[in-house]
Amino acid sequence: MDEIRSMAREAKGAADRAERTAKRAESRATEAQRQAEQALTAANAAQACCTANTEKLNRMFKKSMSK
């Protein structure tokens, strides 16, 4: 009977460790998702800036060519 209790305690300990590991992994995944969303936001802003600059340069070029 003691052997069964010991095995049960070991199994419980292993399950508890697995749960803690899973919670840490979930937390890290959540943080990675947050950082990815920030990177996407920054990339979209940079793209919008580049697009605006390209449009401005094109207008300036067309204006200079029409003179």
Image (cartoon, rainbow, N blue to C red):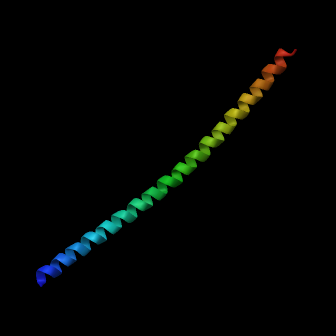
Please provide percent x and percent y for residue 47.
Answer: 65, 37
**Residue located 48% across and 56% down the image:** 31
> Within the image, what quadrant is residue 63 found in?
top right
Please provide percent x and percent y for residue 30.
Answer: 48, 58
Please provide percent x and percent y for residue 62.
Answer: 81, 20
Quadrant for the N terminus in the image: bottom left
Quadrant for the C terminus in the image: top right
**Residue located 30% across and 71% down the image:** 16
| Count of numbered circles in the view | 0
**Residue located 65% across and 42% down the image:** 45
Please provide percent x and percent y for residue 12.
Answer: 25, 75
* Rendered view: 34 above or below 12: above
Q: Is residue 63 left or right of residue 46?
A: right
> Within the image, what quadrant is residue 8 found in?
bottom left
Q: Is residue 51 left or right of residue 2?
A: right
* Rendered view: 17 above or below 57: below
> Within the image, what quadrant is residue 4 found in?
bottom left
* Rendered view: 1 above or below 13: below
- Residue at the farthest bottom position: 1
**Residue located 34% across and 68% down the image:** 19
- Residue at the farthest right position: 67
Q: Is residue 55 left or right of residue 29?
A: right
Q: Is residue 57 left or right of residue 29?
A: right
* Rendered view: 49 above or below 11: above
